[in-house]
Amino acid sequence: VYVNPEANHPLFVTFSHSPDDALRGCIGSLRAVPMSRAGEYAVMAAVKDQRFSPIRLDELPGLTCSVSILHDYETAPSATDWVIGEHGIIINFRSDRGDRYNATYLPEVALEHEMAT
């Protein structure tokens, strides 16, 4: 898919360990942002993902950085109406206490973690 670098798109920047693709940091926006901000999101993914300690300089040679550009959101009519590896998924839910939560899974996450089996 061609992406116009002048356009705004939702995007996520992900750092993972090579070769096993273990997640090391991921930050992005579900709202459209200028593609010129991808570098800013890379820095945030490296040092601001609260699930991990900041990435150290000596780790960089063993990491892969990828940018996922999201497009064509649609609401699925059912929880099973999506194709693993082709579609991402945003899950919104509430706890028993009424607290709201959400989770975002990029299209490649299900394949990388073998969720299809």
Image: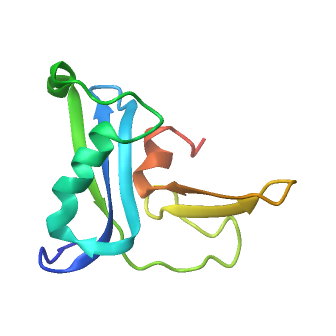
Residue in view at x 82 percent, y 60 percent: 98
Q: Position of residue 52 (x, y in %)?
A: 42, 31
Instruction: Classify 32 as above or below 42.
Output: below
Instruction: Classify 46 as above or below 63.
Output: below
Instruction: Classify 37 as above or below 39.
Output: below
Residue at the farthest right position: 96
Q: Position of residue 16 (x, y in %)?
A: 32, 34
Q: Position of residue 60 (x, y in %)?
A: 17, 27
Q: Position of residue 114 (x, y in %)?
A: 52, 39
User: Relative to residue 99, is residue 102 drawn left or right?
Assistant: left
Question: What is the quadrant of residue 70 in the picture?
Answer: bottom left
Q: Tell me if residue 26 can be seen.
A: yes
Q: Can you say which quadrant of the picture contains the N terminus?
A: bottom left
User: Relative to residue 110, is residue 24 drawn left or right?
Assistant: left
**Which is more toward the observer, 111 or 74?**
74
The color scheme shown is: rainbow
Question: What is the quadrant of residue 9 in the picture?
Answer: bottom left
